[in-house]
Image: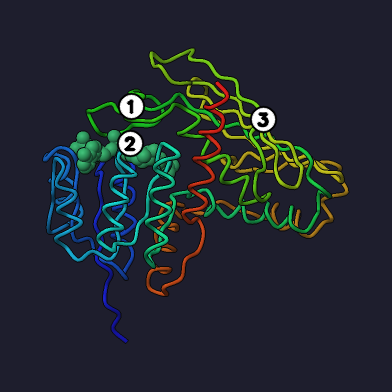
Amino acid sequence: MYIMKLRIGLIGAGGFGTLHLSGYKKNENCELIAVASRTEKHAKEAAKKFDIPKYYCGDDWTKMLEENNLDAVSICSPNYLHAPMTIEAIKNNVNILCEKPICISEKELEEIEIMLKSKELIYFSSFQKRYIGLFSKIKAIIDNKALGEINLVRHFFSHYGPYTSWKPLSEQKWFFDSELAGGGVLLDLGVHCIDILRYMLGEFHEVEGYSWNTSCKKIKNEDNGNVLVRFKNNSLGIISVSWCNEPMEHLELYGTKGTLKINPHSTNPLSFAPKKLKRNKFIKNALEYKPTSDIAQHLLIDHFIDCILKGKQEHPDFNDGKRATEFVLKAYSLK
Ligand SMILES: NC(=O)c1ccc[n+]([C@@H]2O[C@H](COP(=O)([O-])OP(=O)(O)OC[C@H]3O[C@@H](n4cnc5c(N)ncnc54)[C@H](OP(=O)(O)O)[C@@H]3O)[C@@H](O)[C@H]2O)c1
């Protein structure tokens, strides 16, 4: 049976936008129709590299959304543009995959939510960690109470920050401009932490504390941050993020029956106590996890395309993006 290919546009042909483009290129159920970037140079380069028929630059992303009868758009621009671009996409009935953070204020969250409710569009928040197989195995450990009741989690996530560990392409250097970025490391990395914890543990109830400083970058926003959070299951959480440290991610789960320590990027990602837990089938299953060559962002894109074809909204959805943004905004309100 011949399936019509979905017509895809992308805004923001930068570092991460390029990863989206290669994901769409590999998916046989869609075709890249148009790309937009701030500068003609980057729009043109992306169009050439990925064989995209049309490109737009400056503020012509609005024209891109209007002119091409798109089925879906990826929004990979600087954070302050996520909300206006999302709103235009909704007006043009285009399904949306939006990079994190999905916007930078409560007002924007509200506006997007109201508009989305008026349409039957598929909306995905770009939380690709959910597609790393190890996390679904850890979720099974938690859901099946292999560690008993979880009462404390700690999530540490760091690297040396944009322009050092991560290489954004735009010459605008927007990550370090508080107006354009909307926040610092907590908005950048903290949203991933809270999302993967929500995925595994369930909803958070309250943000109870926040400490931060600016110690290594010449910026107004935080380059280190610690958040205290309480989940609805009454588990306490600590999320600690940094743009001043060695690239590192580490999670600890403490339950009434045992402890699990996770280093998702290691070839030996799990350690646990007590030893008798190795007989538990969910722990065994997680210990058998082998990293694959799959790119998490591409798996997310495949899932997004599949949901559009089936007309079925799945996670990570708007509410997932909303809760992660609310988490950060609540922490910022405690400054
Ligand atoms: N999910 C993740 O793990 C992850 C990882 C990295 C980044 N991200 C997110 O992805 C987004 C982009 O980050 P990045 O690192 O890719 O930054 P980047 O390389 O600087 O890319 C930003 C892109 O947006 C374009 N842009 C700026 N203003 C525009 C406008 N008015 N119209 C159209 N395009 C415009 C820039 O164009 P020019 O290059 O032409 O100036 C650039 O191509 C951010 O929201 C970031 O948080 C997510």
Image quadrant containing the C terminus: top right
Q: Quadrant of residue 162?
A: top left
Kind of residue sitting beneath label 1: Glu
Mark 2 touches mark 1? (CB < 8 Å): yes
**Please, is residue 9 above or below residue 236 in the view?**
below
Q: Which residue is mark 3?
A: 208
Instruction: Report whether 283 appears left or right of 33.
Output: right
Which residue is depicted at the point 20% across and 56% down?
65
Q: Which of disc 1 and disc 2 is earlier in sequence? A: 2
Amino acid identity at mark 2: Tyr
Q: Amino acid at mark 3?
A: Glu
Element assignment for label 3:
strand
Q: Residue at x 86, y 44 (%)?
A: 256
Lower position in the chain sequence, tag 2 or tag 3: 2
- The correct choice, above or below, for 170 with respect to 87 in the image is above
- Residue 80, disc: 2
Q: Say whether mark 2 is within 8 Å of ligand 1.
A: no
Mark 2 element type = helix
- Mark 3 neighbour density, 10 Å: few (under 14) some (14–19) many (20 or more): some
Can you tell which mark lies on residue 179?
1
Q: CA distance from mark 2 to mark 1?
A: 7 Å
In primary-sequence order, the first of circles 3 and 1 is: 1
